[in-house]
């Protein structure tokens, strides 16, 4: 068998047959590591890998293909570290939870996944849903549907009555007493079981709601929700599995407890104090700012009836503060990875985060770096993704214009390649 295969391979070589390669001619290419723009570059792709990146426009061999992006700006596929791929904002969102079955959620999620990829985001971290997010990740990985590469938290972990308790806001006979299997914990033993259950179900990352939230039907949006031993149990158990823990947090005390427990990233960080920022710099904790979510929620809260009154009041109070907190954290030196909370606003508008980040002082190329190299480092996959280098997975996008000069160029993505396959051209 081996002799026959080798003979066949020798015959193909003798006939000049070779695996097709793709030559991408990039007029401008963003080197996200050096934070500079290169001109007239050729990216050579074979299979799902980048073979080389070289100066000048290389000529392909017969049978190879050219992608002409000489009038465009090329960069690595973007990464959003905080999305909710199963859902999207709507004034009927809270009622839909009582109407939609898992199949309904799954079919609604398909266009959200597709528009996310077509917007240039080839990798996302899904930060909590019903479990459909895990099935969607698997379907995309198996080539059954179109969407970004998903790393998902599955179901978020919360205490009874906490931000991710799925029974908040319903009448008592429907509340029941959800436990670790549904991501609801009380005490360190529950915490360990919930993490193990999440890993068993297929979660790639653990998310805890370290404080109250804005959009949950619960009174407080900022108070701490876990005791220190509970958070430490979550982090220790996740560490045993070799996975990260992300902490949703708006209030400062909950952030302090999460950072002390060894959390990997703080999501949102709205009411973060400078003391907490200093703690994060010292411990190397990441901030995923989700400015777009805060700004969007504050705007939706002005629409009569869009949110329940308890949610509306929190959105008005907390939402608009998030941009200035991000600005302070960035200037303090807190590590920043791009994340939007897409789903709180329409999927496909993720680019708005670039605008909000640069409005308060982050340079354009640094904002793009936060959505490429930094995001890959946060997830521990910088050896595979995040830059355009030989040996990396061929996730490549292009936009018209010069985003280093006008960040709004990030809105119109004209080319998307993921795993070496072209999805948009």
Image: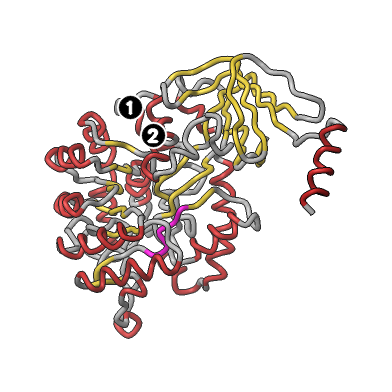
Residue at 81% over, 30% down: 63
Q: How is the image coloured?
A: secondary structure
Range drawn in magenta: 151-155
CA separation, marks 1 and 2? 10 Å
Single out the residue that lies furthest toward the front: 3
Residue 94 in the image, given as x and y percentages of width and height: 40, 66
Residue 164 in the image, given as x and y percentages of width and height: 32, 65
Q: Is residue 164 left or right of residue 101?
A: left
Q: Which mark is residue 362?
A: 1
CB-based contact (under 8 Å), mark 1 and mark 2: yes
Quarter occupied by residue 166: bottom left
Q: Nearer the viewer, residue 17 or 60?
A: 17
Q: Which quadrant would the N terminus be assigned to in this image?
A: bottom right
Q: Which quadrant would the C terminus be assigned to in this image?
A: top right
For residue 265: magenta? no
Residue 392 in the image, given as x and y percentages of width and height: 54, 36
Mark 1, mark 2: which one is toward the viewer? 2
Position of 253 relative to 385 (above/below): below
Is any part of residue 161 visible from this angle? no
Is any part of residue 34 visible from this angle? yes
Q: Nearer the viewer, residue 282 or 70?
A: 282
SS of the residue at dot 1? loop
Mark 2, residues whose alpha carbon is within 10 Å: few (<14), some, or many (≥20)? many
Q: Nearer the viewer, residue 85 or 313?
A: 85
Q: How many marks?
A: 2
Name the residue carrying label 2. 370
């Amino acid at each position: 068998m081996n002799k026959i295969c080798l003979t066949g391979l020798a015959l193909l070589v003798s006939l000049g047959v070779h695996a097709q390669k793709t030559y991408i001619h990039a007029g401008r290419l963003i080197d996200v590591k050096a934070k500079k723009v290169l001109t007239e570059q050729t990216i050579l792709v074979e299979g799902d890998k980048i073979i080389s990146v070289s100066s000048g426009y290389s000529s392909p061999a017969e049978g190879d293909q050219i992608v002409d992006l000489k009038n465009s700006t090329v960069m690595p596929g973007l990464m959003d570290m905080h999305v909710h791929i199963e859902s999207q904002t709507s004034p009927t969102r809270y009622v839909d939870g009582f109407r939609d079955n898992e199949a309904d959620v799954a079919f609604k999620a398909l266009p959200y996944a597709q528009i996310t990829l077509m917007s240039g985001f080839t990798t996302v971290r899904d930060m909590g849903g019903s479990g459909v997010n895990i099935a969607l990740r698997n379907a995309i990985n198996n080539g059954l549907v179109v969407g970004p590469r998903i790393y998902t938290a599955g179901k978020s972990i919360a205490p009874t009555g906490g931000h991710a308790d799925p029974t908040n806001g319903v009448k008592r006979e429907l509340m029941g007493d959800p436990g670790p299997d549904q991501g609801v914990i009380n005490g360190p033993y529950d915490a360990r079981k919930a993490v193990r259950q999440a890993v068993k179900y297929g979660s790639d990352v653990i998310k805890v709601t370290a404080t109250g939230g804005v959009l949950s039907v619960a009174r407080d949006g900022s108070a701490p929700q876990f005791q220190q031993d509970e958070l430490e149990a979550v982090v220790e158990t996740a560490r045993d599995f070799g996975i990260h823990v992300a902490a949703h947090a708006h209030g400062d005390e909950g952030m302090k407890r999460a950072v002390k427990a060894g959390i990997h990233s703080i999501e949102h960080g709205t009411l973060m104090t400078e003391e907490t920022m200093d703690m994060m710099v010292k411990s190397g904790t990441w901030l995923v700012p989700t400015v777009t979510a805060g700004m969007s929620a504050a705007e939706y809260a002005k629409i009569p009836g869009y949110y329940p009154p308890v949610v509306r009041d929190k959105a008005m109070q907390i939402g608009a503060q998030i941009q200035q907190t991000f600005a302070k954290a960035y200037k303090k030196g807190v590590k920043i990875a791009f994340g939007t909370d897409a789903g709180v606003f329409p999927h496909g508008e993720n680019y708005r985060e670039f605008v909000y980040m640069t409005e308060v002082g982050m340079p354009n190329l640094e904002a793009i770096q936060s959505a490429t190299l930094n995001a890959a480092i946060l997830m521990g996959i910088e050896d595979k993704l995040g830059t355009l280098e030989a040996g990396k997975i061929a996730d490549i996008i292009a936009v018209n214009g010069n985003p280093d000069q006008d960040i709004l160029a990030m809105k119109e993505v004209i080319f998307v390649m993921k795993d070496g396959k072209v999805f948009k051209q």
